[in-house]
Image (spheres, rainbow, N blue to C red):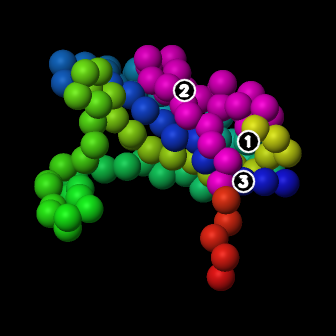
């Protein structure tokens, strides 16, 4: 079985303030989705990505912040590592991600182990 990374992206909406019920429904959806993957023994890890960051350029100059698409304002919000037999299977698992119902997207990529 190989490992794949699911990269979660979305465009933040500063005016969107979910009601507590919506927030709980969203948390429950994430828990159920991750739980389903874990029940198949394919879950490795999941992380949210914060807003604090620094971008270091090739000339070693640092810029506070994080990469955000200049046109769409889309940004990476988190990632998940799963085990799967194929990219196709990993993609099928990704189709259940709750970020899709919020207008976000999931990029599925294979991971290549680094030599020790």
- Res 112 seen here: yes
Which numbered tag is attached to residue 98?
2
The residue tagged 1 is: 37
- Between 2 and 81, the residue placed more toward the observer is 2
What's the distance in space between the residues labelled 2 and 3, CA to CA? 21 Å
**Mark 2 or mark 1: which comes first in sequence?**
1
The magenta span reads: 88-111
**What SS does tag 3 mark?**
strand
In this picture, residue 77 sits left or right of residue 17: right
Which numbered tag is attached to residue 3?
3
Residue 87: quarter of image = top right
**Mark 2 or mark 3: which comes first in sequence?**
3
**What SS does tag 2 mark?**
helix
- Between 75 and 56, the residue placed more toward the observer is 56
**What SS does tag 1 mark?**
helix
- Marks 3 and 1: which is nearer the front? 3
Quadrant in which the N terminus appears: bottom right
Query: Where is 110 relative to 54, above or below?
Result: above
In this picture, residue 16 sits left or right of residue 30: left
**Mark 3 or mark 1: which comes first in sequence?**
3
Q: Residue at x 56, y 34 (%)?
A: 107
Residue 71: quarter of image = top left
């Amino acid at each position: 079985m190989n490992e794949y990374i699911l990269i979660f992206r979305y465009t933040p909406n500063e005016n969107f303030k979910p009601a507590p019920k919506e927030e709980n429904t969203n948390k429950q959806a994430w828990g159920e989705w991750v739980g389903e993957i874990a029940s198949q023994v394919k879950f490795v890890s999941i992380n949210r990505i914060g807003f604090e960051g620094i971008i270091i350029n090739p000339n070693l100059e640092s810029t506070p912040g994080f990469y955000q698409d200049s046109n769409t304002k889309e940004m990476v919000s988190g990632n998940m590592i799963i085990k799967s037999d194929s990219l196709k299977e990993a993609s099928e698992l990704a189709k259940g991600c709750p970020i899709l119902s919020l207008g976000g997207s999931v990029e599925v990529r294979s991971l290549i182990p680094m030599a020790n």
